[in-house]
């Protein structure tokens, strides 16, 4: 990253604002793509799911979301530990976890109210409450409410945010271990990843059944998160772009194509037998199987190789909406999870013909993009602008008020 050139005559506050590091367009673009794919993937009965990346390999948009979140967390929070000390840095992480916790609770109630209202208030043949497995919540809300607020009741549809909170909670310990040596911190992440397989470390997700666990185990997914975190902090270096590494990455993609969620594996008896044997340990999603990790890292490596020296193309106007979604990742994620349920209900009403699928999917993605622009507008606090003041004065005031550091959007 490089800093923008600042005129010597510019106000000091403006110099501070402009001299901040330029945002990496790759981070915003791929986070934005992940949010749009997550919307498509969560629309019930959506035939467009057949064409998302998860159908062509062992990793999906969840890996993209977690890796980019780790990369962004290093930018947004990692510097706090160096500037303000360990305890202030930990407090900032705790503040973010609390924000995510409130967002998780609100998402649950928003979707629960939607499904209950449509199921009971409209004449529909589908029971959306049962379809989302929320019937236990409405039949016996007491234990489920306690479980919801203690994160021991985590229905599958609402599982990404708790995992993200759990991984963020590990950040202070990783920062502390890295003070000893980067290898110590990396070794701790790898060891935790291996131990959760051997010791069956899981977190309960259903008060009525201790065998039901979080669908996304933070002890497994932390390895991918902290890979992005370490790369962003510069603690580890990415492999160079060479023909050998490109060939290895392509080979991993081809192998994953046969092992992933694709019917071709069922047509090859040997591949199918191998798949059944190694599935829980290699491509399982709950504990984040090793091939899922390798597949995503291969995809990320090839994406970097393709864009190397061409990153500026992501600043093209056609990509502005996608990058804007990535800049407001938390808001767009929450909205996409809600609007995907609405989209599924619309498809039930309209039918699932090609035209209906086109209209509902495009309208849904457009609404996610609109929310991103709306949230960005609110974050810009336009009501603070002086009607006759210069833009430089406003920018300097905002810069002084916010203080040095990265844009709040990065923390999303």
Image (tube, grey):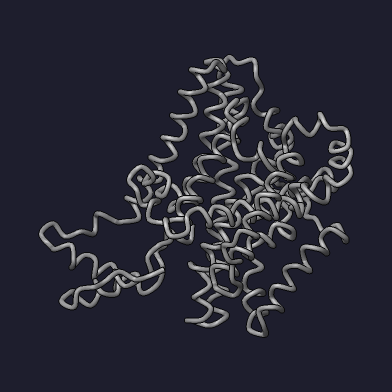
The foreground one among 107 and 304 is 304
Residue 232, horizontal then vertical, whole percent:
54, 68
Residue drawn at x 37%, y 55% as measured from the top left:
312
Residue 87: in sight, yes or no?
A: yes
**Left or right: residue 226 compared with residue 96:** right
Q: Is residue 11 above or below residue 356?
A: below
Residue 215, horizontal then vertical, whole percent:
73, 47
Q: Is residue 64 above or below residue 83?
A: above
In the picture, the quarter occupied by the N terminus is bottom left
Residue drawn at x 77%, y 66% as measured from the top left:
192
How many numbered marks, from 0 up? 0
Residue 131, horizontal then vertical, whole percent:
69, 28
Residue drawn at x 74%, y 35% as measured from the top left:
136
**Left or right: residue 239 compared with residue 186:** left
Write down the quadrant of residue 143 in the picture.
top right
Residue drawn at x 68%, y 55% as measured from the top left:
248
Write down the quadrant of residue 123 in the picture.
top right
**Left or right: residue 58 compared with residue 327:** right
Residue 146: in sight, yes or no?
A: no
**Left or right: residue 235 compared with residue 19:** right
In the image, farthest residue toward the bottom: 180
The foreground one among 340 and 354 is 354
In the image, farthest residue toward the left: 388
Residue 255, horizontal then vertical, whole percent:
74, 45
In the image, farthest residue toward the front: 243
């Amino acid at each position: 990253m490089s800093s923008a050139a600042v005129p010597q005559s510019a106000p000091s506050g403006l110099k501070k604002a402009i001299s901040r590091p330029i945002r990496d367009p790759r981070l915003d673009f791929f986070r934005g793509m992940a949010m749009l794919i997550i919307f498509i993937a969560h629309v019930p009965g959506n035939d467009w799911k057949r064409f998302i990346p998860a159908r062509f390999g062992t990793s999906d948009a969840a890996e993209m979301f977690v890796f980019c979140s780790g990369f962004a967390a290093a930018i947004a929070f990692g510097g706090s530990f160096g500037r303000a000390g360990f305890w202030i840095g930990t407090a900032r992480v705790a503040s973010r976890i609390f924000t995510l916790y409130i967002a998780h609770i609100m998402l649950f109630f928003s979707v629960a109210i939607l499904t209950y209202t449509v199921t009971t208030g409209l004449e529909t043949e589908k029971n959306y409450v049962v379809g989302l497995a929320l019937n236990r919540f409405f039949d016996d809300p007491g234990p489920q409410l306690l479980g919801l607020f203690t994160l021991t009741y985590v229905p599958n549809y609402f599982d990404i945010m708790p995992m993200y909170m759990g991984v963020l909670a590990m950040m202070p310990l990783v920062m502390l271990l890295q003070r000893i040596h980067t290898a110590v911190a990396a070794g701790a992440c790898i060891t935790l990843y291996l131990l959760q397989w051997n010791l069956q470390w899981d977190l309960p997700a259903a008060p009525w059944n201790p065998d039901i666990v979080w669908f996304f185990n933070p002890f497994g997914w932390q390895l991918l998160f902290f890979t992005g975190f370490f790369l962003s902090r510069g603690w580890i270096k990415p492999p160079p772009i060479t023909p050998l590494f490109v060939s290895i990455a392509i080979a991993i993609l081809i192998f994953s194509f046969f092992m992933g969620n694709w019917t071709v594996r069922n047509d090859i008896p040997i591949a199918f037998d191998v798949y059944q044997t190694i599935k829980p340990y290699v491509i399982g999603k709950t504990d984040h199987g090793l091939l899922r990790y390798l597949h995503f890292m291969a995809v990320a490596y090839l994406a970097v190789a393709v864009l190397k020296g061409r990153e500026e193309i992501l600043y093209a106007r056609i990509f502005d909406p996608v990058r804007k979604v990535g800049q407001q990742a938390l808001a767009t994620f929450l909205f996409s999870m809600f609007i995907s349920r609405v989209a599924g209900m619309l498809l039930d009403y309209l039918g699932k013909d090609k035209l209906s699928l086109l209209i509902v999917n495009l309208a849904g993605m457009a609404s996610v993009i609109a929310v991103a622009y709306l949230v960005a507008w609110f974050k810009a606090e336009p009501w603070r602008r002086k009607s006759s003041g210069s833009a430089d004065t406003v920018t300097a005031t905002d810069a002084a008020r916010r203080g040095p550091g990265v844009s709040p959007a990065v923390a999303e």
